[in-house]
Amino acid sequence: MLTFVLRRGIGLLISTFLVITITFLLMQMIPGDPAAVMLGANATPEQIELLRETWGLNQSIHVQFVRYLVNFLRGNFGESLFHRKPVLEIIGQRAETSIWLGVAALLVVVGMGIPAGVLASIRPNGLTDNAMLLVALSGASIPSFWLGLMLMTLFAGRLGWLPSSGFTSILQTGNLANLKSLILPAFSLGFVNAALVARTTRSSMLDVLQADYITTARAKGMRGWVVVMKHAFRNASIPIVTVISFTFASLVSGAVVTENVFALPGVGSLIVQSVLKRDYPVIQGIMFIVAVLYVVINFITDLSYALLDPRIRYRG
Amino acid sequence: MVVDGLWKFATRRRTTGLALAILLSLLFIAAVGPRIAPYDADELRMTERLQGPNRTHLLGTDHFGRDILSRALSGTRITLLLGVSISMFALCIGLPIGMLAGFFDRFGLLIMRVIDALMAFPAIILALALMAILGKPGILNVILAVGLVWAPRMVRVVYSATLALRESVFIEAARALGASTSRILLRHIAINLISPVIVQATFTFAFSIMEVAALNFLGVGIPPYVASWGGMMNEGRTYIIRAPWIILFPGLFLATAVLSFNLVGDALRDRLDPKLRRAM
């Protein structure tokens, strides 16, 4: 198990290094002098020169890269051009909303996807199964922002049941009722992925349910549900875990647009605003954090395989 | 022969035939769109603003009195154009790199690490960052930004297919006969990559038009004066409660296009490569 963790750990470090390198190279692609771009149109040549000096832009590219790497590892992501505050601080202020939204969407994904998949696998080609296939197929083709807007028209506009936009911090106000503003966003974000998880759960369960040990368990006289949950589900869970970990990237992508639709003050709306304002340090910071999160989640997924399936542990 | 094969492909499953029919009508709309549109897509008629679907404006009008149907039809052309360009771009990068990576171990090990790292950036985040780096909103920049997001995924598909092909007996035979590396790559491997690549290109198309719509919706894609489905939905947001049809119909066009491409992609995959048939 230790070799397994160590090996994956080294892979994690390499990936992080590559992610930093890619962000660095992408930022090198910005046309023109970065210092001039960063300081805006009103900067004097002296200011630009000063910034070039502090950033080491007058040095060769590999010296710049090492400097960049050291800064990143120290958690120094630079300063926002627009807010004139450290990038990490700005992202930190926006993180709460995005984390709540992510957790809520994941609850939708897991809470709807897995039960629906298990139900469908018990009666393949039944009503639940076919209805779900339809939802999964159309769900994969509906843009989450459009779904969000339509839900907003219906539930916030026509029916007036739920707030249409905005979110107030729960950590600051202590008011859990604020979560109500996240119901519509979380649903429109999670729905598509829930359909995907449901399909995977179904096919994985179907494979397992045909295995001999399931027949044995049933023959011993165990009740249907116990067999399904205790014997089948655990063994069917590896592909499900994989799909759920894949949903991270798609949830992040979806969140960027969903936060925008529902005017949520999260990291997703921050990156859109930063792109519109050409606030490069913030864009770079968000890119880095999201990519590293992705790499770390993959690492955790790998470890969870080993926990779920002893064979993977020994193979290393 | 070809027509016969196509007919069989289209009629084997009801959904495939339907999806193909939708695709063909979208192509038709893209080709003749402005001519069959009832109005000029950009003509402002302030007296007729925010009308719901009615007899003169079948899908209603927006806040400038522009006809939604005409704008949606006009958006079809730009959507298909972008989808094709992005898929082609991803293909032109993905095919050579993926093939070389799959064939030469050292190069493959190195390049696939980079590809994996690129894929660690969620699609929209990378596309947004690229749009910011490339500068102004514009059609070419959208093709580049979204194309660069999907190219690594194409590399992955080509890479794994090449890896599998490389070990086949017929490649061994070709080598025993003294075929050069370039001949093996071009005459034997590339030919056999056609089906996985076509399938992947279909999915790239579906995903990329969705992503383009998202970029346009966020206001960082193509310029707002060009009628696009995402752009229309963006403009309609202010009036969402009063005039939901401004958003409803472009979204339906988009979802239909994406769905038909996904269905055709699924059917192609089943037809061309039964081994890859997915669980769905």
Image (cartoon, helix red, strand yellow):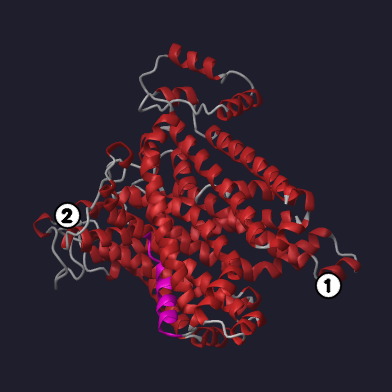
Q: Is residue A74 above or below residue A212?
A: above
> For residue A68, what is the image quadrant?
top right
Residue B109 x/y as whole percent: 74, 50
Foreground: B258 or B29?
B258
Q: Is residue A137 above or below residue B134?
A: below
Give how far apart the Cα atoms at labels 1 and 2 are: 64 Å
Please state the extent of the stretch shown in magenta in the rendering. Answer: A126-144
Q: Is residue A276 above or below residue A47?
A: below
Report the disc number at residue B63: 2
- Please report, as a chain letter, where disc 2 is located: B
A158 to the left or right of B144: left
Residue A205: in magenta span: no
Q: Is residue B43 above or below residue A233?
A: above
| Residue type marked 1 | Val
Our reading of the magenta stretch's main secondary structure is: helix
- Single out the residue that lies furthest toward the front: A221
B199 to the left or right of A147: right
| Residue type marked 2 | His
The residue drawn where x is 66% and y is 40% is A13
Which of pointers 1 and 2 indicates the residue nearer the eye? 1
Q: Earlier in the sequence, mark 1 or mark 2?
A: 2
The residue drawn where x is 39% and y is 44% is B137
> For residue A41, what is the image quadrant?
top left
The reply to whether residue B105 is in sight is yes
Residue B88 x/y as whole percent: 55, 59
- Please report, as a chain letter, where disc 1 is located: B
The reply to whether residue B278 is in sight is no
- Which structural element holds mark 1? helix
- Which structural element holds mark 2? loop
Query: The N terminus of chain B appears in which quarter of the rendering?
Result: bottom right
